[in-house]
Amino acid sequence: MEDKIKRRIRAANYLTVAQLFLQNNFLLDDPLKKEDVKPRLLGHWGTCPGINIVYANLHARYGKDPNFSFVLGPGHGFPALQANLFIDGDLAKVDKKATPTKEGIAYLCKQFSWPGGFPSHASPLTPGVICEGGELGYSLATAYGSALGHPEKKIAVLIGDGELETATALASLNLPKLLNSKANGKILPILHLNGYKISGPTISGRKSERELNEMLRGFGYTPVTILGANPADFQDALVRANQIFKESPAHPPFIVFKSKKGITGPTFIKKVKIAGNYASHQIPLPDAKTDPTQLMILQRWLESYRFQDLFDTKKGFTI
């Protein structure tokens, strides 16, 4: 299972980066040229690799459960969500051009953040989306609302650590006191603790582990911590969360997933730290179309995912 999860994460990361940057040469059949890069780069990278890690692990455990749902709080990380919907064929169910083929990849990437194409943020146009996410902070409330009167439902909700600073998100932490009932479904909050928002550090990212855990316990949750991207650790945390639901339903689990912002992306550009810093939040290579050095970095970045091992032009995905 671990290898399968890692392969899916690599595929989703590649498609995420390709959506953000490429308007041609989507499988790197030739060395990248400036003409292959979109004239306007609009979107967000920093949260995306963490979203892909969470999505892949949840998919591995709950993908066949018809009663399981995923709510995305960091809606600005939409290319990651769309990459996963594309891989699973969910996007093709509503858009026949978005098939998991070579032509479908070209369509996906060219249409992302493009006039008349796919938006840069999660939107109601996306299949299954009930929460646009972003900085407004209502993802946890949306998840609890979706579970009302549906005891069969299991809903995992990913909350950005910048999002957790909003009044709406903080107020929503009180919801298990109000809605923890056998008449409602189970909610599994997952805090995406990457430490930074658009222009600086997050409050949660500067709290000690003890301080953050005590805050969550004060709201009635049982914290479960995941450090890094190891699938085995993530799967163990999901098992632990299920045990808590059974053994201590009055204090449901709350996963704290700590990862580096912009992981697997560029590390330094012009002596500026990118991965593990707020500088990875949006487009880490803003001059990829005009700067040969940034174009070369983009080429190496895409090549690092070894997408040719994950996708066959005749058979499709091999993950």
Image: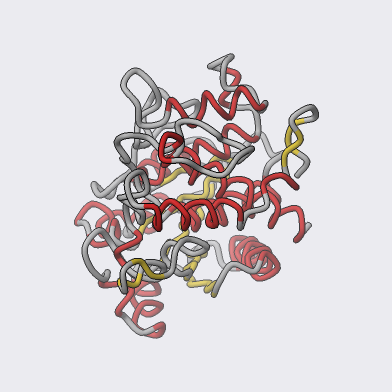
Q: Position of residue 194 (x, y in %)?
A: 40, 67
Question: At x 47% / y 55%, what residue is drawn?
Answer: 296
**Farthest-out residue, top:** 96
- Give 227 or 296, whichever is nearer the viewer: 296
Above or below, comparing residue 226 to residue 26 in the picture: below
Q: Write the residue at 43% across / 25% down.
A: 111
169 is higher (above) or lower (below) than 256? above
Q: 177 or 301, which is in the foreground?
A: 301
For the C terminus, the quadrant is: top right
**Residue 204 at x, y = what percent?**
31, 72
Residue at image x 58%, y 39%?
84
Residue 161, placed above or below residue 312: below
Task: Indicate the position of residue 139 as horizontal and vertical percent values.
Answer: 36, 46
Quarter in which the N terminus is drawn: bottom right
**Residue 304's quadrant in the figure?**
bottom right
Q: 280 left or right of 4? A: left
To which quarter of the image does residue 148 belong? top left
Q: What is the image's colouring?
A: secondary structure
**Does residue 295 lie above or below 146 as drawn?**
below
On the image, the x and y values in percent for residue 224 come to 53, 72
| Badge count | 0
Q: Nearest the camera: 135 or 187? A: 135
Which residue is painted at 34% across and 52% down in the image?
291
**Residue 136 vs residue 85, the one in the foreground:** 85
